[in-house]
Structure formats: structure tokens, C-alpha cells
Amino acid sequence: MRIAIGSDHAGFALKETIKTLLDDLGVPFDDLGTASAEPADYPDFAEAVARAVAAGRADRGILICGTGIGMSIAANKISGVRAALACTEASATLGRAHNDANILALGGRTTPAAAVPSIVRAFLATEFEGGRHGARVAKIAAIERKDP
Ligand code: RB5
């Protein structure tokens, strides 16, 4: 599995922490920026990571801004992306199992630091359950086709 990861300035420190975690887990990743804690606009990095996932250059993405909210809103504008803001391990697990989330959004200023490793591991390890959830995710894709 290959990950695309990105953040704005408010998520930069947590992005660096997560990169170390990915290294420890042996998960390859592409860091699509930002490269420092200087102010940067979250939609730029949301779009880069979302397009990498939608195009198949990455299997999943991780995006971090101050709250994770702006990143998730922006990433979900890209067709085929299902970005989930998860502040708990349970949310990350269910976002994968029920929603087939392909991007995890985190808040550098809001996600409890102690919870981050378990959130990321759950996002990476949990499989989509399909079945009735597959039918619901298919309805999301149908909405995208109605509103391209
Ligand atoms: C930047 O100050 C902040 O607005 C941004 O990181 C993010 O939280 C937006 O959703």
C-alpha cells in the first residue's frame, strides 16, 4: 500500500510525526507538502493528495490541517475521493469498514496526539466490509455522476 500525505502549516508538525510512524510500519509514502510551518493554503495540498488517490498514484491519503475540516471538505470535491475526518480509532475503523474512506483527515490542533498512532493504524489496517455498505457507497458515486 502506498500513501500520499499532505498538510498545511497547522498540520505540518503532525505530518512529520505520521511520516515517522509510516516509516516504522514500513508503509511507503509520498509527501506532497507543505514543507515547513510557514503559512500555506490547505486546499492546495488537499487537491494534490486527493488527485493522487483518485488517479491511483496512491492507494490512500492522509491530510492534516488545523482541524481536518478544511482538508476533508476540499478533498471530497474530487470525484472518487471519500475523505473521513476521524478523531478516534473507532471513527477511523468505521470510516474504512462502512464508508470505504480512502483519505484520512486529521486535525493538527484538535486530534488528541496520543490517539494518532491508533487512528492511523486503524485507517491502514481496516478493510471495507462491502455488502449493504457497498450499496450505500455506490449511491455516493451515483451522486457524483449526477453532479459532475
Ligand atoms: C489555518 O489557520 C486553519 O484554518 C486550517 O489549518 C484548517 O484548520 C482549516 O480547516
Image: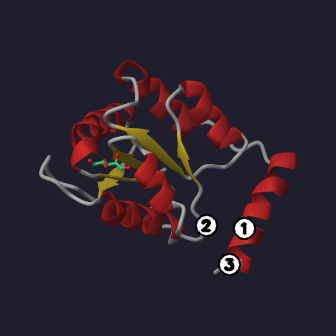
Q: Which residue is mark 1?
A: 141
Mark 1 vs mark 3: give the one in front: 3
Amino acid on which the number 1 mark rests in the picture: Ala
- Which mark, by number, is residue 147? 3
Mark 2 beta carbon near ligand 1 (under 8 Å):
no
**Residue at left 46%, top 34%?**
120
Q: Residues within 10 Å of mark 2 (few under 14, many from 20)?
A: some
Residue 53, horizontal then vertical, whole percent: 49, 63
45 versus 105 height, above or below = below
Instruction: Answer yes or no: is residue 146 visible.
Output: yes
Q: CA distance from mark 1 to mark 2?
A: 7 Å
Instruction: Answer yes or no: is residue 57 visible.
Output: no
**Residue at left 68%, top 78%?**
147
Query: Is residue 22 found left or right of 50 in the rendered image?
Result: left
Residue 126, horizontal then vertical, whole percent: 62, 36
Dot 1: element: helix
**Residue at left 55%, top 26%?**
89
Looking at the image, tell me whether mark 1 or mark 3 is earlier in sequence order.
Answer: 1
Looking at the image, tell me whether mark 2 or mark 3 is earlier in sequence order.
Answer: 2
Amino acid on which the number 2 mark rests in the picture: Gly
Q: Which residue is mark 2?
A: 80
Amino acid on which the number 3 mark rests in the picture: Asp
In the picture, which quadrant includes the C terminus? Answer: bottom right
Q: CA distance from mark 1 to mark 3?
A: 10 Å
Q: Residues within 10 Å of mark 3 (few under 14, many from 20)?
A: few
Q: CA distance from mark 2 to mark 3?
A: 13 Å
23 versus 54 height, above or below = above
Mark 2 vs mark 3: give the one in front: 3
User: Looking at this rendering, what residue extends furthest in the right direction?
Assistant: 132
Q: Looking at the image, do the residues carrying marks 1 and 2 touch, with CB atoms under 8 Å apart? A: yes
